[in-house]
Every structure is written in structure tokens, then in C-alpha cells.
Image: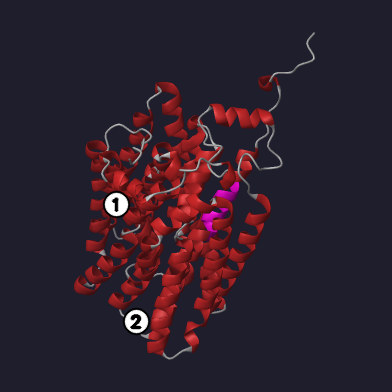
């Protein structure tokens, strides 16, 4: 009997499952920090005498800088690697979150300016986070697991509300809105320190064995993505021409449009949804914090299920295009049920339709899987940055448009129609514009 044991006979380590769990936890904290202002918003706006339009602009502050910093953040990831850039990002955005708790000690006018500035800084610091998530999934997961991995980390945005909306609502109710920022910022700093101690690339991680490394590499994982700079090709790394080529690719433009519309649902939920529950449906802020957990939980379940469905379709059909498009289009059409909230009065029915809408949104939220599938190896961070720039333009437009709709009509009815129409446009973008989903091959500039 041969003494040599093949790699397939050795039990594979499962380090990649720990890595995606860390991505999920960091994404949960990320979205909880974004949502702090929506939970603190009703009490904060009352104390600072802010009308809906002013609140809409403050809600949007995060988006302005977050979008502007996406491509630079992606460039940093491609140049210096995901691990260190992400660690600094987590710690810095958490410190700026903590500082928002102090704005109430300024006069009203100054407090508004300082709050807007701090939200801008949080946006800059968070910019590398999702492009880093996509790069790490591309490096750690074979193609047939990438949809589930991407859906799992992305579902952290819903889990953030499930876990932290009741906590933040209780903190705001019992201790005051300032402590929402103090607690969440402190938790983020702890998360950043845990990240730097535990997360490495496939080639550097001390716990991965050869069987797992071979499995993910042979399955299409980009294991060299964050190799030390002295091991990379001399002409590797991002270039401005890569951005031009990505922006001239029809498939990517369709994906960008779809993500913008999908994120409109996300930012309604992160900004105006608790305010909608308090001002339109008569709940207290404590009740709103708890009620928000049901749509969020459905979004989380839908998010994980969407990835599982997508990867199952890929294994059965071998078609990446079908595997990604079917859940996205179906999920977005289901999300249009948010409009039905305008036609019911009972709180249970409102929450039920919101839950159905966010379940659909979760199923369809496979954009980051598509980024991992399509990004060129030499510009994964920049590709993710462009994707997130277009997608998060909605973090600017959604709160502002809804603020003006509510101010002009005195109701959220038009706002919910606006959100539902965006879901429809996302489905159309994937059906009509995107075409075949495949990895982009960049041309070398002469």
C-alpha cells in the first residue's frame, strides 16, 4: 500500500467558513453604524429642531463621501491588500461614529454642521469595506460557493437591524440618543482589533491546509490576489485605463444601474423606515426598534436563501448568467410589494408587506457575487469601488428625494411608490441590459 496520501483523501480545513463569518460580522457592525442616525433620528431631530428636508440632507451626508471615496478606496485595496486597509477602515469609521454622540453639546446650528461633517467622515472611512468583501470572497471561495458566500456576508445588513435595532432603540429610550453612537462606535473598534488578529489571505493563513488551498484554487479562487508586492508581476495593480474599460462595458453598466436601484430599498430601510413607523404609523421609537426587526429578519433569510438558490442553479445548469439573474429579477419583482403598504391600515399588515418586500430584496441582493464573478483580477478593488459608487449614489438621492416627497405631501405614500419603482427598474436592468455574466478581461494598454 502506498504511503502517499492524495490531497483528496485528506480532510479539507474550513478556514474559508471562518473568513466569511468574519465578513458577516464586520458587515453587521458596518450597517449598524450606518443605521445609528435613523434610530437616534426622531429624538435627535426633535432636540435640534430639524424638519424632514434637513433630516434628509443629514441622512444623505454619509452617501456623498462614501460614493466619492469608492474608487480611491478600491485603489488602496488593490495596492496594499484587503487585510490592513480593511482593519484601518473599521477602526476609523467606528471612532467617527463615537464622536457623533457629542454633537448634542453644541448649539443647534453648530451641531447640525458637525453632525453632517462626521457623517461625511464615516462615509470616507467605510468606503473600502464592500470592495474588500468582494476581493476576499474572490480570493477564498471557488466559483460554485461564491454566490452563497457573497449572499451570507451581504445579509449582515439585515442582521444588523435584527440584532441592533432593538438594542439601539432601548438605549435611545432609556439612556438618550447620544449613547447609541458611543456604544456602537466602541463595538466597532473592538471588531477592528479582532479582524487584524484573525484574518489573512489564503497563502498566509496559518490554519489552512493544502487540501483546502488546492480545492479553492482549482475551483477558481484568486488565491494570489493579495500576494506580497514583491511577488506580483511588475505591471500588476490598478491603472486609470482599467476604469475607462469597465465604464465602457455594457454588462457592468447594467450591473451598476441594477445596484443603484436595489440600494434604494436598502437606504429607505436604513434612513426613513423608523421615522415612517413613528410619524406615519404612530409607534414609539422603542416600538419602532423592535418592529423593524421582522422585515430585517426576512431580509436576512432571503439574503442567505438567494445565495443558496443561485449556487444550486449554477451547479445544476452550469450557467452563471441564469444562476445570478433568476434570483435577482425574481427578488426585485417581489420587493414591489412595498407599495401595498399604502393600501392597508393595520400595523400588522404594514409590517407584513414590508417583511415580504425585504425578503424579496434579500433574495435579489446578489450584486456582490456578480462583482466577484466579473471583476478582472488586476483591478478587483477598483471594479468593486466603481460598482459601489454607482450603487451608493442611492444613499444620496434616496433620503433627499423621500424627504422632499414627505415635506411636499405630508405622507409617505409617494415615497413607497418611489422605492417600488426602483425595484422594477433593477429587474429590467438585469433582464435587458446586463446580458451574459462573465469575468471581464481587460486589454493591456500599448
When the figure is inspected, residue 396 is found, relative to residue 9, above or below; the finding is: below
Would you say 330 lies left or right of 99 here?
A: left
Nearer to me, 244 or 350: 244
Contact between labelled residues 1 and 2, with CB atoms less than 8 Å apart: no
Location of residue 45 by image quarter: bottom left
- Residue at 38 percent across and 30 percent down: it is 320
**Residue 173 at least partly seen:** no
Of residues 329 and 344, the one drawn nearer to the viewer in this rendering: 329
Range of the magenta residues? 21-29
* Residue 393: image location, x then y, percent: 31, 59
Tell me the quarter of the image containing the N terminus. Answer: top right
* Residue designated by label 2: 50
Q: In the rendered view, does 340 fall on the left or right side of 38?
A: left
Please name the predominant secondary structure of the magenta segment in the image.
helix
Residue indicated by mark 1 = 261
Q: Quadrant of the C terminus?
A: top left
Name the residue at 41% across, 46% down: 362
Looking at the picture, how far across and down is residue 20, in whole percent?
Answer: 57, 44
Residue 19 seen by the camera: yes
Which of pointers 2 and 1 lies earlier in the amino acid sequence?
Answer: 2
Q: Quadrant of residue 419?
A: bottom left
Q: Secondary structure at mark 1?
A: helix
User: Residue shown at 36%/74% (left/top)?
Assistant: 58
- Judged from the image, the secondary structure of the residue bearing numbered disc 2 is loop
* Residue 40 relative to residue 434: left or right: right
Is 138 a magenta residue?
A: no
Residue 335 x %, y %:
32, 47
- Let me know if residue 25 is in the magenta part: yes
Residue 286: x %, y % from top left: 49, 70
Mark 1 nearby-residue class (10 Å; few <14, some 14–19, many ≥20): many
Amino acid at each position: 500500500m502506498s504511503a502517499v496520501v492524495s490531497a483528496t483523501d485528506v480532510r479539507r480545513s474550513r478556514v474559508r467558513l471562518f473568513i466569511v463569518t468574519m465578513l458577516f460580522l464586520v458587515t453587521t457592525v458596518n450597517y449598524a453604524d450606518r443605521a445609528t442616525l435613523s434610530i437616534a433620528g426622531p429624538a435627535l431631530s426633535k432636540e435640534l429642531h430639524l424638519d424632514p428636508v434637513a433630516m434628509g440632507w443629514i441622512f444623505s451626508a454619509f452617501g456623498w463621501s462614501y460614493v466619492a471615496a469608492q474608487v480611491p478606496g478600491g485603489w488602496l485595496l488593490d495596492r496594499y491588500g484587503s487585510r490592513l486597509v480593511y482593519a484601518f477602515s473599521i477602526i476609523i469609521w467606528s471612532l467617527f461614529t463615537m464622536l457623533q454622540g457629542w454633537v448634542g453639546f453644541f448649539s443647534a446650528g453648530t451641531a447640525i454642521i458637525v453632525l453632517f461633517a462626521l457623517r461625511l467622515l464615516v462615509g470616507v472611512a467605510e468606503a473600502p469595506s464592500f470592495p474588500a468583501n468582494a476581493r476576499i470572497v474572490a480570493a477564498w471561495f471557488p466559483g460554485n460557493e461564491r454566490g452563497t458566500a457573497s449572499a451570507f456576508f451581504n445579509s449582515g445588513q439585515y442582521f444588523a437591524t435584527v440584532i441592533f435595532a432593538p438594542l439601539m432603540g432601548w438605549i435611545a429610550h432609556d439612556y438618550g440618543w447620544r449613547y447609541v453612537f458611543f456604544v456602537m462606535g466602541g463595538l466597532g473598534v473592538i471588531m477592528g482589533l479582532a479582524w487584524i488578529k484573525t484574518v489573512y489571505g489564503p497563502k498566509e493563513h496559518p490554519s489552512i491546509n493544502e487540501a483546502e488551498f488546492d480545492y479553492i484554487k482549482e475551483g477558481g479562487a484568486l488565491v494570489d490576489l493579495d500576494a506580497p508586492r514583491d511577488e506580483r508581476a511588475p505591471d500588476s495593480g490598478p491603472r486609470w485605463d482599467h476604469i475607462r474599460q469597465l465604464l465602457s462595458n455594457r454588462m457592468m453598466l447594467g450591473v451598476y444601474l441594477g445596484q443603484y436601484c436595489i440600494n434604494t430599498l436598502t437606504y429607505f430601510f436604513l434612513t426613513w423606515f423608523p421615522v415612517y413607523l413613528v410619524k406615519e404609523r404612530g409607534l414609539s421609537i422603542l416600538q419602532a426598534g423592535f418592529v423593524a426587526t421582522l422585515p430585517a429578519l426576512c431580509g436576512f433569510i432571503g439574503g442567505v436563501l438567494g445565495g443558496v438558490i443561485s449556487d444550486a442553479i449554477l451547479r445544476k445548469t452550469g450557467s452563471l448568467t441564469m444562476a445570478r439573474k433568476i434570483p435577482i429579477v425574481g427578488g426585485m419583482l417581489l420587493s414591489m410589494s412595498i407599495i401595498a403598504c399604502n393600501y392597508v391600515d393595520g400595523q400588522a399588515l404594514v409590517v407584513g408587506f414590508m417583511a415580504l418586500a425585504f425578503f424579496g430584496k434579500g433574495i435579489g441582493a446578489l450584486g456582490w457575487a456578480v462583482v466577484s464573478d466579473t471583476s478582472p483580477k488586476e483591478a478587483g478593488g477598483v471594479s468593486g469601488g466603481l460598482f459601489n459608487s454607482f450603487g451608493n449614489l442611492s444613499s444620496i438621492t434616496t433620503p433627499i428625494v423621500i424627504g422632499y416627497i414627505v415635506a411636499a405631501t405630508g405622507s409617505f405614500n409617494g415615497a413607497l411608490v418611489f422605492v417600488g419603482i426602483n425595484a422594477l427598474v433593477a429587474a429590467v436592468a438585469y433582464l435587458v441590459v446586463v446580458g451574459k455574466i462573465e469575468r471581464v478581461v481587460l486589454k493591456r494598454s500599448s
